[in-house]
Image: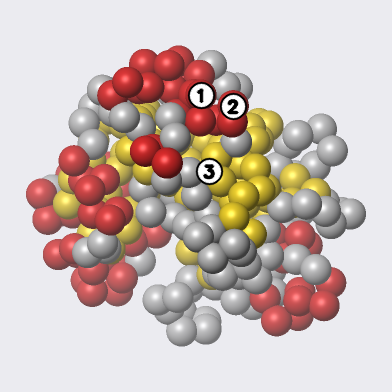
Amino acid sequence: MRVVLLRIGIDSGAGEMQGPLFEDGSFELVPIPDGFHKLGENRETYGNTKCRSGRFLVDYFPEGMRANYKNSPIHSDPEFETFTYGDPTKGAKRGLRNLDEGDLLVFYAGLEPWPQRGERNLYIVGYFNVCWAGLATELSETELNARFHNNFHVKHKDALQDQRNRLVLVQGDQSSKLLKKAVPISAMGKDKAGKPLKVLSEDAQTCFSDFGGRIGIQRSAPRWVPASHVANAARFVRSLA
């Protein structure tokens, strides 16, 4: 089996903030803005979409940003109702199409304390026990709609028409989870130029490896756990509630 780490959710580069982390360790996964549709074409917005707490997503933005984002459409992907993820990519994420049944796709996101803002860190927020992965073109129309009808890239037919030939899709089985409490995996390090960079914490390196010294995880490229650490990583992730 294989285990891969993937960053998701709103961040300073896509949405200008981090998701909210509450005092008890629970959190909300806030999606990134929808960069495909024009304003009004996607009816799911930060102002009309509720999250687990029952609050609207826009409530977690800094007060001065709420007016700008209230009517902004959201790109809700991955989704944890039917456990699907999609990406119309030609880059590193294209490798996700090679995941097999039984592999683990582990999602992490940037979070910061709320309502009192504080230190931002990276946390595991959920995972898929993969039951299918591949390109949208590998599925018939019937299979695509049966498996991925709730995925952003499939339910928005204009997006699907534009992206289908390059759309990577991953489906998790019913044992997949959006965690109740976030699990920290980052520490503050530095890049080659000496600038601050989020890196895997020592504990996370013990679990997932140091990726050959490439411990920076601030970016969203998939990180494939080496075979030497897969069994330990899988046990750890599947133990999370």
Colour theme: secondary structure
Q: Is residue 197 above or below residue 215?
A: below
Q: Which of marks 2 and 3 is nearer the N terminus?
A: 3
Dot 1 lies on which element?
helix
Q: Earlier in the sequence, mark 3 or mark 1?
A: 3
The picture quadrant where one finds residue 58 is: bottom right
Q: In this view, does 68 lie to the left or right of 232?
A: right
Q: Tell me the residue at 52%/35% (across/down).
A: 126
Residue type indicated by callout 2: Asp
Q: Tell me the residue at 57%/22% (across/down).
A: 240
Residue 191 in view in this figure: yes
Residue 166 x/y as whole percent: 19, 63
Q: Is residue 4 above or below residue 153?
A: above
Residue type indicated by callout 3: Tyr
Whether residues under marks 1 and 2 lie with C-beta atoms below 8 angstroms apart, the answer is yes
Q: Tell me the residue at 42%/45% (across/down).
A: 214
What is the spatial separation of the Cα atoms under label 3 and label 1, in whole angstroms? 17 Å
What is the spatial separation of the Cα atoms under label 1 and label 2, in whole angstroms? 5 Å
Q: Between residue 120 and residue 106, name the one nearer to us.
A: 120
The picture quadrant where one finds residue 67 is: bottom right
Q: Classify the position of the N terminus by image quarter.
A: top left
Q: Mark 3 points at which residue?
A: 108
What is the spatial separation of the Cα atoms under label 2 and label 3, in whole angstroms? 15 Å
Q: Mark 2 points at which residue?
A: 203
Residue 210 x/y as whole percent: 44, 35
Task: Identify the mark at residue 206; answer none if there is no mark.
Answer: 1
Q: Residues within 10 Å of mark 3 (few under 14, many from 20)?
A: many
Residue type indicated by callout 1: Thr
Q: Classify the position of the C terminus by image quarter.
A: top right
